[in-house]
Image (tube, helix red, strand yellow):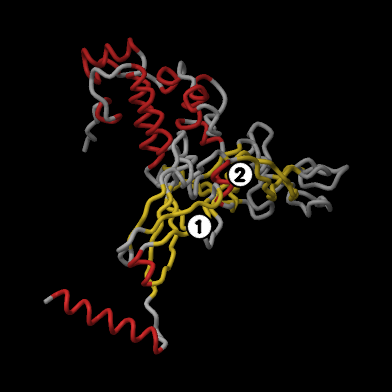
Amino acid sequence: MATAQRDYYEILGIPRDADTKTIKKVFRELALRYHPDRNKDPDAEERFKEIAGAYAILSDPKKRAQYDARGFGGVAGFSPEDLFGGINFEDIFGGLGFDFGPGPGGGFFERFFGRRKTHPLDRNIEIELVIPLERVLTGGEEEVRFTRLELCPSCHGSRAKPGTKPEPCKSCGGTGNYIKSWKEKGTTFQQITSCKACQGSGIVIEELCPSCGGRGEVEREETLTVNIPPGIEEGMALRVPGRGHKSSKADEPPGALYVVVRTAHDPRFERRGAHLWHTETIPVVDAVLGTSLEMLTLDGPVTVSIPAGTQPGAVLRLRGKGLPEFGTKRRGDLYLRVLVQVPEKLSSEERKLYERLRTFEKKEKR
């Protein structure tokens, strides 16, 4: 069954008369939300490619005119390089740390339509970095440590003892396979099995490299400084190309390092995106008469007025006292949830006062 293609204006959620500035702004917002480096949902990459494809057509005056005049038929046949080769993604995203690879257009088409095929997933490294809320607020540098595989410096990946070299397997002639052929009723059959002598590698190593134990690779501890953008979202992954495991093949580049950023638990606040929540418990009398509280924020202490008659569970909002919204200059809010503490034990004097209050309230209701 054919899949219906969505209108490019609908994909970006813009009117057909939107100007270039609006198209670029909307694309940036949507791309920040769905870029696979920060959104790990299974469908994020396909959604991102759909958004980028719509932008590639509508941001180019000639392609847009063809699309407006003839629909999808007017822009059919473009390769990924044709679509994205003229777009400077680094300019659009303003150094937010997203990797689009080398090449034209920031290598968008290479990364999302081909380059990943040359990066086996087992060459990538994923680590977690836990940062405090203060780092989310300000952004800045953080140091990470990780272990990566590199070619053994002694055997250079050959797995053989220095001074020796692997030899072609005599059992299979260096093919790694054993082929058995036979004929039945004029038809030739072949059965191909992996060579047991060389385990399918096609080579035999008489003496293994003592430095790596014949693996051809060694582990190396590395330290790297990564830049945390202000307002980085929970679970966002920073991609550092070329810092994954090195390939044993000279023509294959290393994998990538993915630094998944988590927010450290903070007893003061609960993080909800760019907003922060804090719970404060006050006595009944303060809820009734009102009071003021001195509370900490990420910007320092502030005085908060609790209005008279505040109900249990009431929420007060402190505008702009939350975290930065990623990719913008806006800040979230700090929400103060107010709980009311009901005394479990009363002194005789307190009980008398509460009884007088109850008597008074009953008279008021009559």
**Percent of width and height locating residue 69:** 21, 12
Q: Determine which of the numbered discs, if any, sits on residue 295 in the image.
A: 1
Q: Is residue 142 left or right of residue 334?
A: right
366 on left or right of 110: left
Relative vertical location of residue 361 with respect to residue 319 in this rendering, above or below: below
Q: Residue furthest bottom?
A: 348
The N terminus, quarter of image: top left
Residues 139 and 261: in front is: 139
Horizontal arrangement in the rendering, residue 160 relative to residue 264 (left or right): right
The answer to whether 348 appears left or right of 164 in the picture is left
Between residues 231 and 259, which one lies in front from this camera angle? 231
Residue annotated with mark 2: 123
| Crowd class of label 2 (few under 14; some 14 to 19; many from 20; radius 10 Å) | some
User: What percent of the width, then of the height, locates residue 151?
Assistant: 74, 42
**CA separation, marks 2 and 1?**
48 Å
Mark 2 lies on a secondary structure that is: helix
Asked if 42 appears above or below 68 in the picture, the reply is below
Label 1: state its secondary structure: strand
Q: Is residue 140 visible?
A: yes
Q: Position of residue 87 (x, y in %)?
A: 45, 19
Image point (37%, 62%), residue name: 290
Which mark sits nearer the N-terminus, 2 or 1?
2
Q: Which mark is residue 114?
A: none
For the residue marked with disc 2, what is the amino acid? Arg
